[in-house]
Image: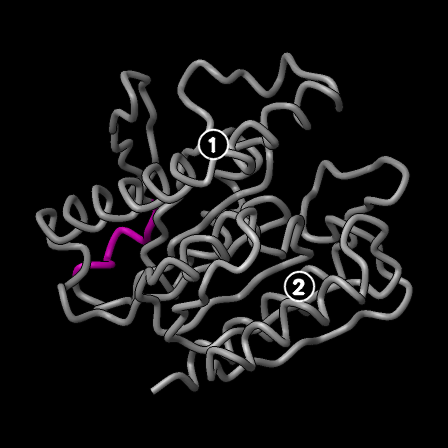
Amino acid sequence: MIEITVPYEVNGRSYAGRIVCDDDAAERAYPVLFMQPDWYGVWPETIEQARTLAAGRYVVFLADMFGTDYGPENKDFDGLLQGMLAVHKDLDFTLKCGSLAYETMLQKAIAQGLVTADAKKFAVGYCAGGGFLMEQTRAGAEFDAVTILHITNPAPVVPGTPCKMTGRALIIHGDKDPVTSQEMLNGMQAELDGAGVEWQTVWFSGAVHSFCVPSANFPGAQYDEKLCRRSYRMMHAFFAETE
């Protein structure tokens, strides 16, 4: 596969996203898939997720929201939580870094001939990355469709923020998720209704948080290979039917 590290800088700190796609992506005219990973950021597990998603389907843009010096392998649960909250609570940074990650990788991919400017633009967010992606779409980031997997922090960090989402939305969630309750998802769905967004939510019975994160194995969060494969099939079909 082709893997290209794409550096960018936000507020004097270094970040590095990654473009991941098949070797023949330039000939296949794949759509873009902007990927907001979970609180691990860009590291071996999320890069492997990007490879899985890219294979035969997309040119994946893996966003770095935490910085090249983040070092998730050296962080315990509390360290990862604090790293995620530092991004989540700073809306200006979330929007600035997310937008710069996407635009910088898009321009690099176009310059490399991997995608065209008029390619379909999709996005996927995992856990906290789903929350970051929601903030980007609320602010008007233009994606044809988005998929949000076991979202963390679905409500706006700034209450009353207008929702400017324009694309379609697929939300996939576990009905036993202790991180994001059904009530919280109901609020997000009402927000999408108010913005005139076409959405659908899939609930997996008995599933908790992080079922698409291979390393998840702590109370309330558990990887489930079967549900992850099912989620990806649903996502691919959802994107494929987007006109």
**Label 2 crowd bin: few (<14), some (14–19), many (20+), radius 10 Å:** few
Residue at image mark 2: 229
**Amino acid beneath label 1:** Val
State the SS at label 2.
helix
Question: Would you say residue 1 is visible in this rendering?
Answer: no
Report if residue 24 lies within the magenta region: yes
Residue at image mark 1: 42
Report if residue 156 lies within the magenta region: no
For the residue pair 207 and 97, the one nearer the viewer reads as 97
- In space, the residues marked 2 and 1 are separated at their CA atoms by 21 Å
Region of the chain picked out in magenta, as a range: 20-26
**Label 1 crowd bin: few (<14), some (14–19), many (20+), radius 10 Å:** many
Upstream in sequence: badge 2 or badge 1:
1
- Screen quadrant of the C terminus: bottom left
Identify the residue at image location x=42%, y=58%: 55
Identify the residue at image location x=41%, y=70%: 165
- Screen quadrant of the N terminus: top left
For the residue pair 165 and 69, the one nearer the viewer reads as 165
State the SS at label 1.
loop
Is mark 2 in CB contact (under 8 Å) with mark 1? Answer: no
Instruction: Name the image quarter holding residue 213.
Output: top right
Residue 60 spot, x, y in % from top left: 36, 52
For the residue pair 219 and 1, the one nearer the viewer reads as 219
Residue 58 spot, x, y in % from top left: 36, 61
Residue 91 appears left or right of 86: left
**Amino acid beneath label 2:** Arg
